[in-house]
Image: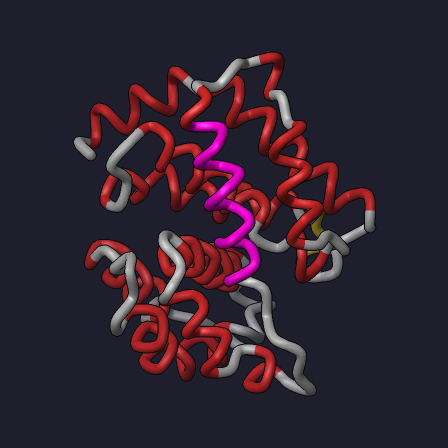
Amino acid sequence: MEKQSFIATIKRYYPWINSMEKAAFHIHDNVNQKYDDVLPYGFHLKMTASYVSRYGYLVSDTEGDVLVLYASAYLHDTIEDARMTYNDIVKFLREFRGEDFVLPEAVRLQLEQQVPEIVYALTNEKGRNRKERANNLYYKGIRDTRFASFIKMCDRLANIQYTIMFVFANRMLDVYRKEYPEFIQLISEGSVTQIPDAMKKEAERLLNSESYII
């Protein structure tokens, strides 16, 4: 999609996107989910969606794709962290009305069909540690689901960005640095949605930033 068309779509559907953001914040607030134990979880969701705003035009073809990306960014942790199920997300999307903004029927159906699949793909497996929770089966599900690799990259960029915002509290930055070569390979090779080179360069820039780990 041309960047100007992408921006025009965001402007056209902004009331719906803004309502989705607020609804997602509420879902996590309802279970008292925090980001880094102190921040409202909406902080992370907003950062993740910011990368959709920055790079979404590189993977979108239609207006429906744009809304799928935003909804997936805002809802990507609802199964893993907010006690929702796959069917809860389907029901939520079916009933969601963003400021009474009426979506075209084809777009509404696309959201109901694709967003739950993306959120499900991005939900960690059961495991005793980080490696077990993000195993090969988990990454295969991401690669096989349209847009899931892109949203996973938005999520990772948001997490990396956060670690360098507070340079004396970035205990996860070294983890992300060590994981990155395998991580980018696991979400990219054979994926139905390729990660744009611009996002890879952004991740490498952030990971190579000066840091002070304590």
Where residue 42 sits, quadrant-wise, is: top right
Nearest the camera: 110 or 17?
110
From the viewer's perspective, is residue 62 above or below residue 76?
Answer: above
Q: Residue at x 36, y 54 (%)?
A: 146
Q: Provide residue 197's location: percent of width, then percent of height.
A: 20, 59
Tell me which residue sits at (42%, 53%) in the image. 151
Among the 4 quarters of the image, the one containing residue 77: bottom right
Question: Which residue: 67% across, 36% down?
Answer: 92
Q: Is residue 4 left or right of residue 97?
A: left
53 lies above or below 214? above
Determine the main secondary structure of the stretch shown in magenta: helix
- Left or right: 76 with respect to 10? right
> What x and y, as percent, mark residue 130?
59, 81
The front one of 110 and 194 is: 110
Can you say which quadrant of the picture contains the C terminus?
bottom right
Q: Residue furthest right?
A: 31
From the viewer's side, name the closer residue of 65 and 210. 65
Quarter of the image for the N terminus: give it. Answer: top left
Which color scheme is applied? secondary structure
Q: Position of residue 119 (x, y in %)?
A: 55, 54
Q: Closest to the observer: 120 or 164?
A: 120
Horizontally, residue 155 falls left or right of residue 182, namely right
Q: From the top left corner, tell me how far across and down residue 193 is, in percent.
A: 29, 57
Kindly identify the residue that appears in the image at 38 percent across and 24 percent down: 10
Q: Is residue 158 magenta?
A: no
Point out the stretch of residues depicted in magenta: 107-121
**Image vertical order of residue 148 relative to residue 190, above or below:** above
